[in-house]
Each structure stands twice: as structure tokens, then as C-alpha cells.
Amino acid sequence: MRLDHVQLAGPPGCEDEALRFYGDVLGLEAIPKPEPMRASGGAWFRVGDHELHIGIEDAFAPARKAHPALRVDGEELDRLAARLTEAGAPVDWDERYPGVRRFFTADPFGNRIEILAG
């Protein structure tokens, strides 16, 4: 067994914001959804050998505790924190994980995302 993808939710009509945030700001590669699934909306992204899906949820509520954690190298962590800050996203550094540099941010819909180095 291995992890294939992680799915977060977004409100109806969030696709352009998802593409901007996850693609332009975080630097993830947008990938096309299979044709039969496109009508349901959302956006998919490649994260290394895995995928991150943003699905549409009519009664949307952001995931404020459950979250994906994206690992980058040490120098990229600081560059990414700066890009997020410039884009108006929160960057909340957390030092509770011994030996790991990390911060939490939120996508435009309020979903929690952890970014860590190492």
C-alpha cells in the first residue's frame, strides 16, 4: 500500500484561486483531471510522486486541523515563506518539532497546510 493523493475541499468556483495559490505561489504542477470527473470542478496538482486534489464541496468548511505536510529543502523553505508572505498568506513558524524547521499557512479557502524542511 502507498499513498496516492490527498484531497482538500474548496467552495464552488474556487478553481482559479486554487490554480493561483497551489500552482503559482506554492509552485505545484497543475495536472488535468480525467474527463469524466471534470464536470465536478476542482483542481489537481502533482506533489513529487503523489497528488493533491482540491475538490468542490457545496457546504464547504475549511480543514483547520487536518492538513497535508509538504517537505522542501532548507533554502526553499525560506523562499517559499517569502512568496507566501508576498501573496498575503499567513506564515506561522512553529518550533515544537525538534530538529525540524517548519511553518503553517492556509490556502485562500482557510485549509491548513504545513511546510517543513529536511
Image: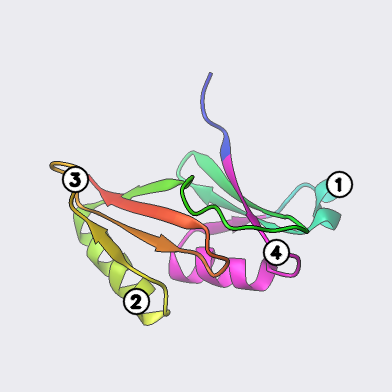
Q: What is the number of the mark on residue 36?
A: 1
Q: Earlier in the sequence, mark 4 or mark 2?
A: 4
Query: In terms of secondary structure, where does tag 4 sit?
Result: loop
Q: Earlier in the sequence, mark 4 or mark 1?
A: 4
Per the model, the C-alpha gap separating discs 3 and 4 is 33 Å
Q: Is residue 10 magenta?
A: yes
| Residue range corresponding to the magenta coloring | 6-31
Separation of residues labelled 4 and 1 (CA atoms): 20 Å
Question: Which quadrant is home to the C terminus?
Answer: top left
Q: Which residue position is annotated with label 4?
A: 11
- Give me the residue at 77% from left, 47% from top: 34
In the image, is residue 106 above or below residue 2?
Answer: below
Query: Element under label 1?
Result: helix
- Residue kind at label 4, given as amino acid type: Pro
Amino acid type at mark 3: Val
- Distance between mark 2 and mark 1 Cα atoms: 37 Å
Number of residues whose C-alpha sits closer than 10 Å to that of mark 4, classed few (under 14), some (14–19) or many (20 or more): some
Marks 3 & 4, CB-CB < 8 Å contact: no
Q: Which residue is mark 3?
A: 100
Examine the structure image and report whether residue 100 is included in the region drawn in magenta: no
Choose the circle earlier in sequence order: 2 or 3: 2
Mark 1 residue crowding within 10 angstroms, few (<14) / some (14–19) / many (20+): few
Q: Residue at x 37, y 71 (%)?
A: 90
Helix, strand or loop at disc 2?
A: helix
The picture quadrant where one finds residue 19 is: bottom right
Which is closer to the viewer, label 4 or label 1?
4
Task: Describe residue 101's horizontal placement relative to residue 82 as left or right.
Answer: left
Quarter of the rendering containing residue 15: bottom right
* Disc 4 to disc 2: CB gap under 8 Å: no
